[in-house]
Image: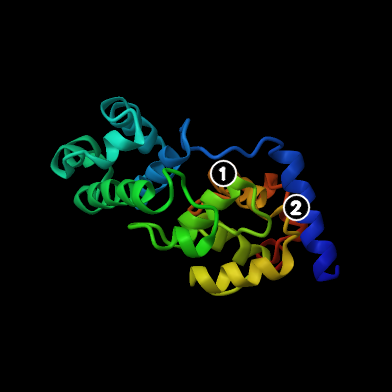
Amino acid sequence: MEREQKVQAIVEALKQAYPDPQCALHYKKDYELMIAVRLSAQCTDKRVNEITPALFAAYPTLEAMAQADIADVEELVRSCGFYKHKARDIVLACQMLLTQYGGKVPDTMDALLKLPGVGRKTANLLLGDLYKTPGVVVCDTHCIRICGLLGLSHGKEPEKVEKQLREILPPEESSDFCHRIVLHGRAVCIARRPQCQSCTLAPYCDYVNRG
């Protein structure tokens, strides 16, 4: 099977399996997604969703979050790990949104990367989910691992894998593709016990076909 045909087949199989690829993090406002993604580093989405209701209730507006005492935010996010760094980044990023970006999460990679705590993975997710920007690739651990098994990418460095996937994925499908890969990694292609026998991607998977 040619590479382009393989990619299209994988995209279609994932669309059939996961027709509604929503971000697992809960949010209502653009900056809330930025905050939730920052909290999700080295932490499960489930845990973040348990933390954010109280955080967003304590600071219900961007202005309130920007004016928050970092020590108070630390206490609210303590259970998600690395809480001191995360609390500082959240407050400083919210301040920057107000002072430099008119109170809105920016819609370009360059601007997003200037925000404290925002790297390429976070920036790509924000661009895809908030602005439906074509061509974004969110290279989290599920994406890197599963795309490597499928033979769509090689290596484990996020920026290199992102570049490889950008070159082969249809731009209009790439953001949803990454969400679907995460769902697939949690449900079927589980790191320590992959369910290859019931995997919809098995016909296209290099790992399976190598036996």
> Does residue 125 appear to the left or right of 134 in the view shown?
left
Residue depth check, mark 2 versus mark 1: number of the one nearer the observer = 1
- Report which residue position mark 1 lands on: 130
Residue 63 position within the rendered picture, expressed as x and y whole percent measured from the top left: 31, 36
Horizontal arrangement in the rendering, residue 79 relative to residue 185 (left or right): left
Residue shown at the point (33%, 57%) measured from the top left:
116
Give the amino acid type for the residue marked by disc 2 in the picture: Val
Dot 2, how many residues are within 10 Å of its Cα: few (below 14), some (14-19), or many (20+)? many
Left or right for 96, reference 34:
left
Tell me which residue sits at (65%, 65%) in the image: 207
Q: Secondary structure at mark 2?
A: helix
User: Which residue: 68% across, 39% down?
Assistant: 18
The N terminus, quarter of image: bottom right
In percent of width and height, residue 209 lies at 73, 65
Between 51 and 172, the residue placed more toward the observer is 172
Q: Are marks 2 and 1 in contact (CB under 8 Å)?
A: no
- Would residue 152 be seen by someone viewing this image from the given angle? no
Q: Nearer the viewer, residue 147 or 98?
A: 98
x then y, percent, for residue 54: 29, 27
Q: Is residue 74 above or below residue 171?
A: above
The answer to which image quadrant residue 19 occupies is top right
Tell me which amino acid carries mark 1: Leu
188 vs 85, left or right, is right
- Tag 2 residue: 11
SS of the residue under disc 1: helix
Instruction: Give the vertical position of 174 relative to 153 (above or below).
Output: above
Pointer 2 or 1: first along the chain:
2
Count the labels in the image: 2
Q: Residue furthest left?
A: 71
Per the model, the C-alpha gap separating discs 2 and 1 is 22 Å
Residue 122, given in percent of the width and then of the height, sits at: 46, 54
Q: Quadrant of residue 78?
A: top left
